[in-house]
């Protein structure tokens, strides 16, 4: 049944006059009359009594009226929801972030959610390498990751990250020499399985600057690694973003040299079309 017929029925029932109802519906009176007649034919019911006082609902029309109103309401709500989806103002976003965007990613999500409160957003701490795999197979809409990314993923740089030396407070002096510290303390690092990008960055930094740690030990996560540093069990090379979770007893010192810096940005898969994601990307990039 054409929704236009129900809208004509409800409007005429509310107005009580063909002329007034036709004006609201932007129809001529003959066109409205035809719609009402068509509805009566389809239902097999007489819906209106037409007289000098206008159009009055029959008993059958009175029974149908509340159901017709409910159907129209649901139809209008559905149509509005479709428009919201088309505009990207409702839906869901699955996002990833890492230690380097510990502050940036939640801030971007919070700002976007204030503008589009009907978008359901999940934000999870996921290593950059894993985020890229999830973007490729469609499990993630966008990710705050280490750059560059592989094709067909595309990205926009948002900030420059750098390596920092995490060491026990009593181990670092004003003129701390990294090569000397590496000879005195084990180098603690995130396992390649958990932090492939950081592990490769540290390895590249050590090679580029001809630094050779005496010993290297792995930890499964940054929190464990920092706890080991605080206990005096070693030193570590971490992103500056780790400054937000450094415990007491640990100090961070910027290191200099080749491969000490890299870019972090937002990445997505352009082969996967999503209006909500496009709105989010636009918002992030415009505010960068």
Image (cartoon, helix red, strand yellow):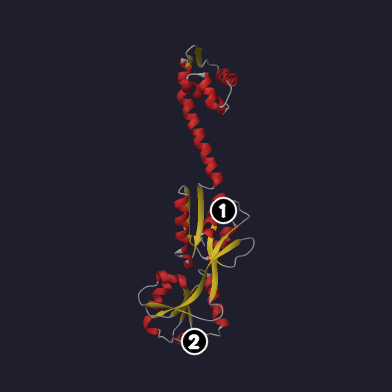
Q: Residue at x 51, y 70 (%)?
A: 195
- Can residue 85 be seen here? The reply is yes
Element carrying mark 2 = helix
Q: Residue at x 54, y 44 (%)?
A: 85
Q: Is residue 143 above or below residue 42?
A: below
Residue identifier under label 1: 278
Q: Which mark is residue 157?
A: none
User: Marks 1 and 2, Cα distance to the nearest angstrom?
Assistant: 46 Å
Tag 1–tag 2 contact (CB < 8 Å): no
Element carrying mark 1 = helix
Q: Residue at x 64, y 63 (%)?
A: 151
Q: Which mark is residue 179?
A: 2
Q: Position of residue 207 (x, y in %)?
A: 57, 82
Q: Quadrant of residue 103?
A: bottom left
- Can residue 220 be seen here? The reply is no
Q: Is residue 261 above or below residue 2?
A: below
Q: Is residue 136 above or below residue 42?
A: below
């Amino acid at each position: 049944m054409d929704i236009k017929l129900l809208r004509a029925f409800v409007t005429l029932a509310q107005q009580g006059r063909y002329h007034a109802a036709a004006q609201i519906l932007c129809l001529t009176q003959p066109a409205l009359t035809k719609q009402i007649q068509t509805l009566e034919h389809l239902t097999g019911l007489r819906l209106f009594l037409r007289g000098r006082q206008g159009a009055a609902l029959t008993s059958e029309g009175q029974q149908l009226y509340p159901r017709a109103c409910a159907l129209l309401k649901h139809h209008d709500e559905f149509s509005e929801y479709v428009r919201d989806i088309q505009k990207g103002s409702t839906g869901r976003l699955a996002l990833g972030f890492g230690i380097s965007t510990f502050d940036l990613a939640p801030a971007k999500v919070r700002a976007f959610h204030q503008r589009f409160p009907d978008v359901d957003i999940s934000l999870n701490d996921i290593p950059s390498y894993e985020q890229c795999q999830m973007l490729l197979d469609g499990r993630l809409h966008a990710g705050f990751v280490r750059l560059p990314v592989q094709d067909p993923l595309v990205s926009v740089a948002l900030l420059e990250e750098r390596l920092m030396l995490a060491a026990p407070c009593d181990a670092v002096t004003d003129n701390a020499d990294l090569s000397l510290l590496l000879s005195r303390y084990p180098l603690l690092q995130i396992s390649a399985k958990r932090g492939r990008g950081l592990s490769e960055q540290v390895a590249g930094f050590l090679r580029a600057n001809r630094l050779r740690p005496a010993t290297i030990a792995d930890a499964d996560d940054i929190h464990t690694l920092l706890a080991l540093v605080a206990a005096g069990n070693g030193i570590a090379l971490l992103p500056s973003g780790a400054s937000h979770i450094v415990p007491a007893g640990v100090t961070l010192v910027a290191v200099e040299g080749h491969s000490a810096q890299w870019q972090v940005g937002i990445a997505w898969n352009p082969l996967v079309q999503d209006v909500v994601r496009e709105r989010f990307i636009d918002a992030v990039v415009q505010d960068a």
